[in-house]
Image: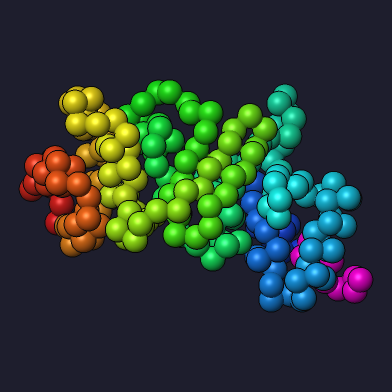
Amino acid sequence: MPQSIISSVKNRILRHGRGWVFSAHDFSDLGSDSGVRTALSRLQEDRLIRRVSQGIYDYPKTHAALGTLSPSTDDVAQAYAAKNGAKIQASGAYAANAIGLSEQVPGRAVFLTDGPTGRVKVKNLEILFKKTTVKNMFAAGSREALAIQAMKFMTEKHLNNYRLEKIKTLLMGSNRKDFEKNIQYAPRWIRSILFKLMDGVLK
């Protein structure tokens, strides 16, 4: 095992800093797949990095009182997506909680994907990847897509003024062109609410 590959992989990890979640895919330019995987295995044995799940690692953050911290759910999901060359979009209870529509912290985070289905377990949290339609993934990663998935979960009858203000705050960072493009495949009732909510607000 060339020491240079281990050093190169280690240096990249250190440059990213603590909290980075990654896979062998993030080092594909540094050597062969087997070489990178061996380097990661060696760095795990040295306790520099931690294996979070099959093929996914992190350079863990630590806390003086709490010790080693769990990686961010979003970061694990993004590493899974990059590893599989896929797009992902938070959905369901996880999406609703992420933008403050629900205070319930789900025990399972569901992400829609155009890549392979899969399941990642991080301590007590299960991250599930569900293959979905092209339309559902059209604006994946955008504010609008997050709002749409959260609204689908909450349903129209539970979208009170407080929750609508949360959605409005989220979408304030968009411009009208992107907003209109990103909601074009949303259900009709969601498009209607969003157009009324953001009317005269976006430029």
Q: Is residue 2 magenta?
A: yes
Q: Is residue 129 visible?
A: yes
Compared with residue 122, is residue 171 higher up or lower down, i.e. above or below? below
Give the quarter of the figure containing the N terminus: bottom right
Q: Quadrant of residue 85?
A: bottom right
**Which quadrant of the rendered structure holds the C terminus?**
bottom left
Residue 162 can be seen, yes or no: no
Residue 27 percent coordinates (x, y) = 70, 68
Name the residue at 65% across, 46% down. Answer: 19
Give the magenta-colored segment's residue range: 1-10
> Is 129 drawn above or below residue 28 in the view shown?
above
Please tell me whether residue 128 belongs to the stretch shown in magenta.
no
Residue 155 % position (x, y) = 24, 31
Residue at x 35% of width, y 57% of height: 133
- Does 172 appear above or below 86? above
Q: Residue at x 43, y 35 (%)?
A: 94
Q: Which residue is located at x 18 percent, y 42 percent?
A: 190
Q: Residue 138, located in which quarter of the rendered image? A: bottom left
Q: Position of residue 93 (x, y in %)?
A: 40, 32
